[in-house]
């Protein structure tokens, strides 16, 4: 069986064929063996060794020196001419030359001069070539009658040619001594040349010399010998199993010329291609004791040696290495421990899994003598052996010390021909260089036996590390890795997965703090070590985008803050007192993945709060509050003593009542100079008999409200409450009627400009829509009247110049662009139309001598709050109602004098500034 891997190896190292006519740039010639080159003679071979330091990073080409010519040795020519080469992964190289090889200077078959030229091409700079000429002279006179050489890429047989006296017996005749160059393939030996040959496959195949040479064979004669050489697996060789060992066989009859005529010689070579058994510990190489293609009769073994790399070993050397050489009836056995120092390991990666194989090249040399002819045969075999692939899963050592907050892992061991190319993290693939640049140092560690390992460090805080919290204060860190390796020089990839895990009690939980002022809760949350990786619950709701906006959410990377009004729906009312309400806000920081409470805050504060207002017109307004202690209370079900007096407004937290002191079963008590009006807010049920009672299921809810009036003079409005379990308390309160003026965006009066919108910008003659509203009263007997309105250049309401807009509750008839009053209807915002007045005026500006004095105006109004059933005051006769016989007459552009007496029901309002622009698209 042919050994193709050997030829491929030659092909890899000697792939480029360079003819002697090619120019060599930057040629460096060394005529003697340089550093890293060593040559020696090994019987019928010359061996040249190159150290890895010389070959590393270079491509080697070998040329045979033939006198003045240099012949490039291609793989096919090397096998045809008796040259072979082997190299380990580190570049240690050996070149073997048969002394019977082509281009060897042969002197009488005793002295042999071998000359080779080695050319080293640098991979990085191919134009840089280092050249070494090597010559070696070997003496070899111990020729046996027949010499058979089995090398890694060819088999060779040479036979002594018989003297003339022996030719009659079919043996070859010696020719006269001479010095010659061993024949070049295809060339004739002239008078002593080979004529033709017949190969036996076993069928006869005749060829003349030229045809044999073209087929890859070499046939030649030397001074005393006839030589035949054949590569493995040619068409004219065949396989035969001898004693269970497969062998490659060459049999040929060679016809050659002698001075006395034509002679014929039968030549045969048989080389083993198998016969190796393996165990975990040893290699056993079996060679047939009787090589039947070479031996016909009885024979006797005279010498038997083993060697390594073409060199014999003596018994002490064999013993030191643990080698044995023995013979049985059928085999000669060579045993070599796996891992012996004369071989080497090589990495492989079938199916992306790491394996190794052991390589060694033993030599067997046997000398035997045929009993019938007394001819000696020297049989020499150089036999490279590679063990089957042995899986070597990389070992992982997790050297992580959690307190150092650093993953540390060692992966190995590997042979020197393994390279770490990349690492796959959870976020992607990084080369070794990129990993180092990212702060994940990768180191290679070498050991005395030539193996190596790799280590990697990754901080726990790196983004490639996955995290999980099995407990609130504990973090488990995961680092999934895939190490990507290559075997050299083939660059075959393989990978190994590693999963690292460590835990630390290193979680700093977030914290909450809070405070209050008179209006709101102020909440601050400080993030813990895991940042804002939680949900925030305000009250019983998760904080959402709408709440963030409502509660002025702010965040700076380490904290967030909220401002929550105490009246917000997420706050809970705990207790109502005479002048305050106690409210509580619950804040929860929640881990939804694990259902953990990370932090909580229950902030309870008192806030100024008045639930009752007493109005001078005898109207009482009261606010009932739903407390936490009555969770099932529906405020809309609350009534006064008169159950027909229901709230004028209610929601799920409040109920507002507005009533006059002479209604809703309000009681009245006189004492000293005061009169006390009193009523009660409660939750009542009807038993179908006219009587009322509180629910036996729901808690009692009673809230007593009171107003104190001085006889003939309104002084204060107050209320009192009867202390009962779980009931809200109330405060003594007083109040006054308020009026406000706003500027609407358009005639729909739905959207109004806010304080931050001023100054409002308008263009000339664009309508300005004003609304004046009586606030915080539901008394339908009250009416708001606009008495006078005017515009000024300055904010001061009495400044000049000024312009009248409304005069004596009517439009200014001296104005070419008169004021327009707009009707007010009931809608979701306006409950009592008489409490609201609306008017519009076109935008204008003040001028003097046709020059604009200023591009802004302020609008002011005097409003009067009237009893709709009273005609006591002219101003209270309705908007723009003029008494009989009176006609408004105003001097244009001049504000009339203010009223001489100021009514307690009069209110003063102002709006502005309003800016004029010339851009009509505003």
Image (cartoon, helix red, strand yellow):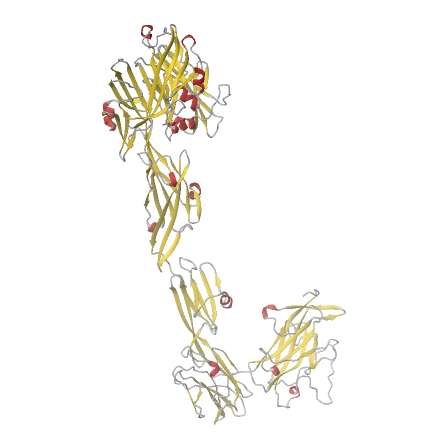
Q: Quadrant of residue 513?
A: bottom left
In which quadrant is the N terminus drawn? top left
Is 402 situated above or below 818?
above
Q: Quadrant of residue 132?
A: top left
Query: How far across and down, in percent of the image, does residue 588 sit?
Result: 41, 66
Is residue 465 visible to us here?
yes
**Number of numbered callouts drawn:** 0
Q: In which quarter of the image is residue 356?
A: top left
Nearest the camera: 792 or 438? 438
Nearest the camera: 834 or 759? 834
Is 823 situated above or below 43?
below
Query: How far across and down, in percent of the image, does residue 422 sit?
Result: 42, 42
Query: How far across and down, in percent of the image, does residue 447 sit?
Result: 32, 36
791 lies left or right of 136: right
Query: How far across and down, in percent of the image, does residue 715 sit?
Result: 52, 87
377 lies left or right of 548: left
Is residue 91 visible to us here?
no
In which quadrant is the C terminus drawn? bottom right
Is 425 situated above or below 752?
above
Is 487 situated above or below 208?
below
Nearest the camera: 547 or 357? 357
Residue lying farthest to the right in this orientation: 849
């Amino acid at each position: 069986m042919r050994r193709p891997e050997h030829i491929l190896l030659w092909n890899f190292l000697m792939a480029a064929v360079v003819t002697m006519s090619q120019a060599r740039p930057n040629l460096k010639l060394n005529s003697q063996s340089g550093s890293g080159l060593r040559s020696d003679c090994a019987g019928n071979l010359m061996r040249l060794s190159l150290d890895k330091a010389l070959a590393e990073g270079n491509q080697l080409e070998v040329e045979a020196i033939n006198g003045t010519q240099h012949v490039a040795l291609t793989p096919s020519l090397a096998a045809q001419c008796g040259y072979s080469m082997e190299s380990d992964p580190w570049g240690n190289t050996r070149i073997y030359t048969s002394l019977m090889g082509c281009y060897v200077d042969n002197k009488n078959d005793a002295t042999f001069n071998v000359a080779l030229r080695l050319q080293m091409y640098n991979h990085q700079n191919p134009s840089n070539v280092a050249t070494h000429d090597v010559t070696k002279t070997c003496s070899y006179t111990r020729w046996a009658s027949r010499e058979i050489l089995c090398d890694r890429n060819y088999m060779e047989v040479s036979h002594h040619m018989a003297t003339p006296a022996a030719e009659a017996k079919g043996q070859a005749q010696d020719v006269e001594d001479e010095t010659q160059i061993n024949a070049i393939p295809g060339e004739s030996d002239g008078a002593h040349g080979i004529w033709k040959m017949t190969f036996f496959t076993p069928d006869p195949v005749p060829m003349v010399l030229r045809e044999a040479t073209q087929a890859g064979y070499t046939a030649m004669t030397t001074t005393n010998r006839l030589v035949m050489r054949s590569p493995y697996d040619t068409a004219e060789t065949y396989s035969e199993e001898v004693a269970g060992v497969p062998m490659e066989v060459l049999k040929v009859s060679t016809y050659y010329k002698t001075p006395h005529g034509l002679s014929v010689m039968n030549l045969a070579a048989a080389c083993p291609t198998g016969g190796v058994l393996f165990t975990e510990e040893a290699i056993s190489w079996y060679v047939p004791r009787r090589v039947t293609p070479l031996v016909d009769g009885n024979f006797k073994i005279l010498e038997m040696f083993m060697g390594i790399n073409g060199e014999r070993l003596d018994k002490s050397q064999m013993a030191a290495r643990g080698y044995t050489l023995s013979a049985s009836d059928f085999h000669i056995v060579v045993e070599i421990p796996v891992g012996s120092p004369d071989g080497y390991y090589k990495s492989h990666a079938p199916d992306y899994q790491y394996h190794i194989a052991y390589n060694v090249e033993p030599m067997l040399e046997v000398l035997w003598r045929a009993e019938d002819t007394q001819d000696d045969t020297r049989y020499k075999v150089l036999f490279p052996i590679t063990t089957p692939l042995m899986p070597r899963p990389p070992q992982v050592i997790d050297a992580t010390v959690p307190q150092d907050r650093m993953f540390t892992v060692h992966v190995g061991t590997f042979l020197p021909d393994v390279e770490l190319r990349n690492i796959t993290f959870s976020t992607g693939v990084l080369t070794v260089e990129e990993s180092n640049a990212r702060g994940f140092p990768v180191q290679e560690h070498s050991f005395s036996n030539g193996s190596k390992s790799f280590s990697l460090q990754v901080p726990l805080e790196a983004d490639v590390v996955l995290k999980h919290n099995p407990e609130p204060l504990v973090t488990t860190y995961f680092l999934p890795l895939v190490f990507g390796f290559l075997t050299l020089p083939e660059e075959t990839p393989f990978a190994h997965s590693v999963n690292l895990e460590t835990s630390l009690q290193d979680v700093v939980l977030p914290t909450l703090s809070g405070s209050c002022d008179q209006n709101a809760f102020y909440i601050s949350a400080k993030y813990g070590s895991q940042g804002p990786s939680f949900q925030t619950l305000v009250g019983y709701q998760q904080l959402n985008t709408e709440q963030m906006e409502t509660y002025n959410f702010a965040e700076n990377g380490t904290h967030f803050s909220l401002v929550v009004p105490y009246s917000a729906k997420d706050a809970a009312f705990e207790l109502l007192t005479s002048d305050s309400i106690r409210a509580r806000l619950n804040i929860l920081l929640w881990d939804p993945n694990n259902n953990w409470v990370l932090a909580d805050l229950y902030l309870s504060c008192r806030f100024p709060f008045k639930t009752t207002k007493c109005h001078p017109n005898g109207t009482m307004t009261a606010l009932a509050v739903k407390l936490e202690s009555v969770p099932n209370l529906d405020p809309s079900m609350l009534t006064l003593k008169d159950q027909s007096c229901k709230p004028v407004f209610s929601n799920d937290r409040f109920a507002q009542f507005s009533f006059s002191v002479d209604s809703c079963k309000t009681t009245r008590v006189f004492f000293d100079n005061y009169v006390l009006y009193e009523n009660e807010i409660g939750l009542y049920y009807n038993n179908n008999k006219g009587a009322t009672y509180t629910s036996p299921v729901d808690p009692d809810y009673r809230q007593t409200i009171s107003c104190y009036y001085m006889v003939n003079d309104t002084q204060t409005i107050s209320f009192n409450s009867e202390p009962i379990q779980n009931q809200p308390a109330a405060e003594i309160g007083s109040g006054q009627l308020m009026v406000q003026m706003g500027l609407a965006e358009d005639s729909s009066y739905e959207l109004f400009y806010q304080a931050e919108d001023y100054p409002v910008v308008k263009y000339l003659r664009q309508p300005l829509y004003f609304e004046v509203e009586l606030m915080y009263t539901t008394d339908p007997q009250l009416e708001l009247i606009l008495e006078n309105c005017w515009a000024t250049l300055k904010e001061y309401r009495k400044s000049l110049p000024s312009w009248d807009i409304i005069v004596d509750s009517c439009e200014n008839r001296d104005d070419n662009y008169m004021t327009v009053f707009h009707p007010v209807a009931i809608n979701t915002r306006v409950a009592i139309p008489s409490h609201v007045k609306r008017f519009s005026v076109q935008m204008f500006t003040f001028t003097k001598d046709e020059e604009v004095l200023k591009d802004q105006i302020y609008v002011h109004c005097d409003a009067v709050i009237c009893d709709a059933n009273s005609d006591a005051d002219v101003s209270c006769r309705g908007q723009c109602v003029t008494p009989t016989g009176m006609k408004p007459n105003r001097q244009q552009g001049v504000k009339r004098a203010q009223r001489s007496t100021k009514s307690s029901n009069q209110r003063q309002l102002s709006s502005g500034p309003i800016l004029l622009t010339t851009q009509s698209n505003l």
